[in-house]
Structure formats: C-alpha cells, structure tokens
Image (cartoon, grey):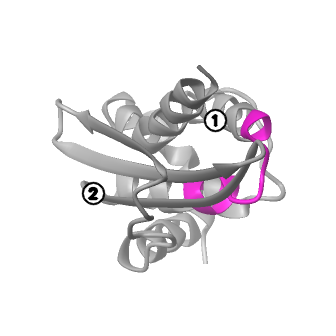
Amino acid sequence: MELDDLYRRVIMDHYKNPRNRGTLDEDSLTINLNNPTCGDRITLQLQVEDGIVKQAKFTGEGCSISMSSASMMTEAVTGRTTEEALELAERFSTFIKGGEAEFEELEDIEALSGVSKFPARIKCATLSWNALRKGIEHQKQ
C-alpha cells in the first residue's frame, strides 16, 4: 500500500467515524466558526479545568478534510495544557502550509500532509484548529 493510500484511509476513517463528535454541557467554552468560501461550519466545545483541556467535542458540517481535521484535533488536545494545545495548533499551522513540523506522537495528523499542495483546502484543515486558538485565547481574558 502506498503512503497516499494510507493517508486517504486515515482521513476517511476520521470522517466516517469521527472521534469526539457531540456536545458538552452548558458550562463548556463554545466556539462557532465557518469557512465562507466552501461552507464548512464547526462548533467546538472545550472543557478546561486548571489549565488542562479535559474534554474537546465538536459538531458541524463540511468536507472530509475539515471534519477529519476536527476529529484529529480533539484527540490531540485532550489531556494537554492550554499552552501545549496552542503550541500544537501553531505546529499544525506551519505543517499544513508545507513547513517542517513533527507529529511523532500524533501520527494521524500526518495524513493531512497532502493538503499543503491544495491552497484552497488549507482553510478547511485549519478551521477547527483556529476555533481551538480562538477559544483558548478568549478563555484567558
């Protein structure tokens, strides 16, 4: 099996079987974002306690890239400090734009590496990560 086929399967697995899809209670931090160019929409909910992302869930509609990326992001940030989550979002942003970034501990994220070849899809992949950033920065205020 070629690497592109494997990556395609990982993306489709997260799209068809999203991790952490759903909602949290009313006390959670809720962020709504959309990508007007393609219609992707996401609602991200975070439960942050003592500076740690205890839970992250999302709902929304969009292409396989945006929904897969949201699924991967919620898995990646759960259990991390908000600072670690922001650093991960920064690494992801660099990575998805074709820059150098390592994700050894988060292999599924590397499946999105091909997105950098399609500039119009970068916004799809970064939508949930931008919601994460916005939420954590808002919570710090």
- Where does the N terminus fall, quadrant-wise? bottom right
Q: Secondary structure at mark 1?
A: helix
**Residue 89 got which mark?**
1
**Residue 74, located in which quarter of the rendered image?**
bottom right
Instruction: Answer whether residue 101 is magenta in the image.
Output: no
Query: What range of the chain is rendered magenta?
Result: 73-84
Instruction: Answer whether residue 76 is magenta in the image.
Output: yes
Q: Secondary structure at mark 2?
A: strand
Q: Residue at x 59, y 33 (%)?
A: 136
Q: Is residue 20 above or below residue 125?
A: below
Q: Nearer the viewer, residue 30 or 67?
A: 30
Residue 39: x and y in percent read 16, 42
The residue most toward the front is 27
Q: Residue at x 69, y 33 (%)?
A: 86
Q: On the image, numbered disc 2 is attached to which residue? A: 60
From the viewer's perspective, tell me whether residue 136 is left or right of residue 37. Answer: right
Q: Is residue 9 above or below residue 50?
A: below
**Residue 97, located in which quarter of the rendered image?**
top right
**Residue 14 got which mark?**
none
- Three-letter amino acid code of the residue under disc 1: Ala
Q: Residue at x 77, y 33 (%)?
A: 83
* Main secondary structure found in the magenta portion: helix
Residue 87: x and y in percent read 75, 32
Mark 1–mark 2 distance (CA, rounded to whole Å): 19 Å
- Three-letter amino acid code of the residue under disc 2: Gly
Q: Is residue 19 above or below residue 119?
A: below
In the rendered structure, which disc, 1 or 2, sits on the residue that comes first in sequence? 2
